[in-house]
Image (spheres, grey):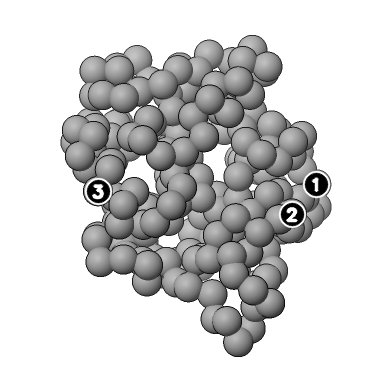
Amino acid sequence: MIKVINYGLGNILSFINLYKRLNIECGVATSSRELEGATRIILPGVGSFDHAMDSLNQSGMRPALDELILEKKLPVLGICVGMQMLAGSSDEGQRPGLGWVPGSVRKFDLERVKQLPHMGWNDVDPVDAEGLFKGFGGSSKFYFLHSYYYECEQQAHVLATANYGADFTCAVKNNNVHGVQFHPEKSHQYGMSLLKNFSEL
């Protein structure tokens, strides 16, 4: 079963409703006990980096998540701030991130971008046409709302890029750990296809 982590941040019901339409079993986890039976995990997130990290750590689920993701290698998908939390640090705050995909979160350079936040539909160019982007072919469009982007330490962890003033990493992958900066739950058919692909990893 796919479990969506509810630590007070994210569009939880959007994921539940979307997977219901796909006839894929999906539930919500608000405690370590409710993570039992999970086969895949979605980590959503909105707002600031430090607040998100504090909320996750205070939820009591962090030790169970570390065990499931790092030891048992369950597939996980971080979304928006949930993706940024996969990094070791962020320009937005002082808290350490999860460190599951080596890298840092950087703020867009206002001299290069039109305005912040980066909001709206944007083309996404996958590096790998398998996994999350299986069956997509070429470029696809997803909905973004953010002012920070992921800077991977290793190019091998870049799964897709987009352009906003300059190319930036908008999806990452490190073995069983995946992250997307955009909102698949708000991205209509493209988002539904990506979330379906995640359920089949």
Label 2 or label 3, whichever comes before in sequence order: 3
Residue 47: percent from left, percent from top:
43, 52
Residue 41: percent from left, percent from top:
42, 31
Residue 148 relative to residue 24: left or right: left
Q: Nearer the viewer, residue 101 or 116?
A: 116
Q: Given contact means CB atoms under 8 Å apart, are the residues at marks 1 and 3 in contact?
A: no
Residue lying furthest bottom: 111
**Residue 137: image tag:** 1
Residue 115: percent from left, percent from top:
64, 74
Residue 53: percent from left, percent from top:
29, 50
Which residue in the structure is indicated by mark 2?
121
With respect to residue 149, does 174 lie above or below? above
Whole-angstrom CA distance, mark 1 to mark 3, is 38 Å
**Residue 157: image tag:** none
Residue type beneath disc 2 = Trp
With respect to residue 108, does 34 lie above or below? above
With respect to residue 150, does 174 lie above or below? above
The quadrant where residue 67 appears: top left
Residue type beneath disc 1 = Gly
Q: Given contact means CB atoms under 8 Å apart, are the residues at marks 2 and 3 in contact?
A: no
- Secondary structure state at the residue bearing disc 3: helix
Residue type beneath disc 3 = Asp
Residue 104 relative to residue 65: left or right: right
Label 1 or label 2, whichever comes before in sequence order: 2
Whole-angstrom CA distance, mark 2 to mark 3, is 30 Å
Which residue in the structure is indicated by mark 3?
54
The quadrant where residue 61 appears: top left
Residue name at image x 74 percent, y 54 percent: 121
